[in-house]
Image: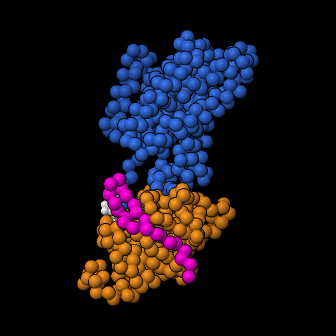
Amino acid sequence: MTFLNFLISGISLGSIYAIIALGYTMVYGIAKMLNFAHGDVIMVGAYICFYAVSRFNLPPLVGVILAMIVCTVLGMVVERLAYKPLRQAPSLAVLITAIGVSYFLQNTALLLWSSNPKVFPSFFVSGSGGTGVELFGGQLKISYVTLFTIIICVIIMLALTWFTGKTKMGKAMRACSEDKGAAQLMGINVDATISMTFAIGSGLAAIAGVLLCSAYPTLVPTTGSMPGIKAFTAAVFGGIGSIPGAFLGGLLLGIIEIFAKAYISTQLSDAVVFAVLIIVLLVKPAGLLGKQIREKV
Amino acid sequence: MEPILKVEDINVYYGSIHAIKGVSFEVNQGEIVTLIGANGAGKSTTLNTISGLLHSKTGSVTFLGEDLGRVPCHKIVSKGLALVPEGRRVFLQMTVQENLEMGAFTQGGKSVDADLERVYAQFPRLKERCNQVAGTLSGGEQQMLAMGRALMSHPKLLMLDEPSMGLAPILVEQIFDIIRELHKAGTTILLVEQNAQAALSVADRGYVLETGKVVTTGTGHELLESPTIKKAYLGG
Ligand SMILES: Nc1ncnc2c1ncn2[C@@H]1O[C@H](COP(=O)(O)OP(=O)(O)OP(=O)(O)O)[C@@H](O)[C@H]1O
Ligand SMILES: [Mg+2]
């Protein structure tokens, strides 16, 4: 039964990684850049939700929506101001800029909200005050946060699959990620599409921020960086640029991390996670679901 | 006759490389015009400049009376100007049908189904493969897809950059048949070809480019008969 408990918390943690990894992978797919500031957008989302709910006593749902709006706008503004001018620049310059943006967001958060940890409120409490469901006579306990996180992740995954596979804008996004010049010849506005991708990724980051802080309720300005790096790892693990890859990578990473903590060692869990990543990349350099299509001549 | 496309004195640079040096030419309504020239003469650069992927430092490109200089690249296709780029550049990870839908990106929603039928009628091979990923098509099929995709936007002027590249002779024949058909249906065509013989025999007029400059022009027939052209581009 403990095994099942660990598995479920692994899936839950992995779901959060997956939601963050989706942002990384979509932005990489289309802008061909690693947005290292993505993790810090999570932190901003969590703070916005925290203040909305704890200080202004708004309902949690309003807090989450507010966080999504702020992060969506933030993502688009960062893209417009920091990344768009570098569209033609070497990728190293863009990477360094992204790291710069990451520190900028962290330090702005430090100024605005100080380094004192905030205790994130718990939203997932039933009317009678319970925090979860118990199965098998109490042997298996699943908290509402866990359940909710997994459900949200599945919904996001289905919605994105539908969006990229069935809608005109989603297909345009895939076209841009393959060949921007050809996409422009089709009449697709590439700049607007990139901006939209940042908007979607950042909106998802806000959701991830709220879920993350609901599961691990200590909120500081660096809250986003470690999950950000893990999610980036998850995106690479699954095959960066691939949406199902981010989902799979995130889930596996979460499960491996929890199992490593439970059965190997808490301190070594991150080392185990990265060791698995390295092994996977040695065997499949493009990641689990990464594709390499060769061009015809 | 009012030209549908007028290119005046364009100069295009790749960094310090001066690729197009004051090229001017025009295409009239209903014509097939071809640009021929050796590798690196600047044919693709010219087409890419007209379609807005590259920009000229001087001069102008006028299409249907409108200066395209300030029109962003993605707005050009809706004006009736479509390019089938060199090397096809179909979306390899998307299906045949999705590629065609991208061609109709600027078209209103309803006409798309009718346009798909029209293109599938023109290229029955594409219909058979409509759910296949474009990356798994053969080279010739990809070329058909690239042409079909451009036709989805109802171009008034269709620009083709080496549509016969890498194709078996029978397929080249097929591609040229399609070009003749499109022409008959009233589409104006600007054709870039390595295969000067074939290009000049379908073209009303041709321009010969050499290292970024127009060196000769004339009707297709004149150029085919010209001794210098014969020597340089038609293999003696
Ligand atoms: N991206 C680029 N960067 C630098 N120089 C370029 C670039 N693309 C083309 N050139 C140069 O510009 C000139 C014209 O190239 P262009 O591709 O227009 O030739 P082309 O006539 O289409 O040749 P081909 O028949 O081989 O396709 C060439 O000298 C080429 O080296
Ligand atoms: Mg060329």
Q: Most prominent secondary structure in the magenta stretch?
A: strand
Which percent across, then down, holds residue A129?
Answer: 71, 14
Q: Residue furthest top?
A: A116
Q: Nearer the viewer, residue A48 or B115?
A: A48
Q: Which chain is blue?
A: A
Front-lying residue, A287 or A23: A23
- Point out the image quarter for the C terminus of chain B: bottom left
- Residue B168: x and y in percent read 35, 74
Quadrant showing the N terminus of chain B: bottom right
Instruction: Please name whichever residue, A262 or A180, is drawn nearer the observer in this view of the structure.
Output: A180
Q: Is residue B3 magenta?
A: yes
Residue B209 visible in the shown view: yes
Q: Residue at x 64, y 19 (%)?
A: A50
Relative to A214, B143 lies left or right = left
Q: Is residue A160 above or below residue B43?
A: above
Q: Residue at x 44, y 41 (%)?
A: A86
User: Where in the figure is residue A283, as x and y percent of width and height?
Assistant: 32, 38
Q: Name above or below for residue B228 compared with residue B164.
A: below
Q: Quadrant of ligand 1?
A: bottom left
Q: Is residue A111 above or below residue B50?
A: above
Q: How many marks?
A: 0
- The one nearer the camera, A116 or B169, is A116
Residue A128 as seen in the image, left or right of residue A135:
right
Asked if residue B8 lies in the magenta stretch, the reply is yes
Give x and y (percent) for residue A33: 43, 39
Report the magenta residues as a range.
B1-22
User: Which residue is drawn at the image coordinates 68% and 16% (left, top)?
Assistant: A54
- Based on the displayed image, in which of its 4 quarters is residue A61 positioned? top right
Query: Which hue belongs to chain B?
Result: orange
Q: Is residue B132 visible?
A: no
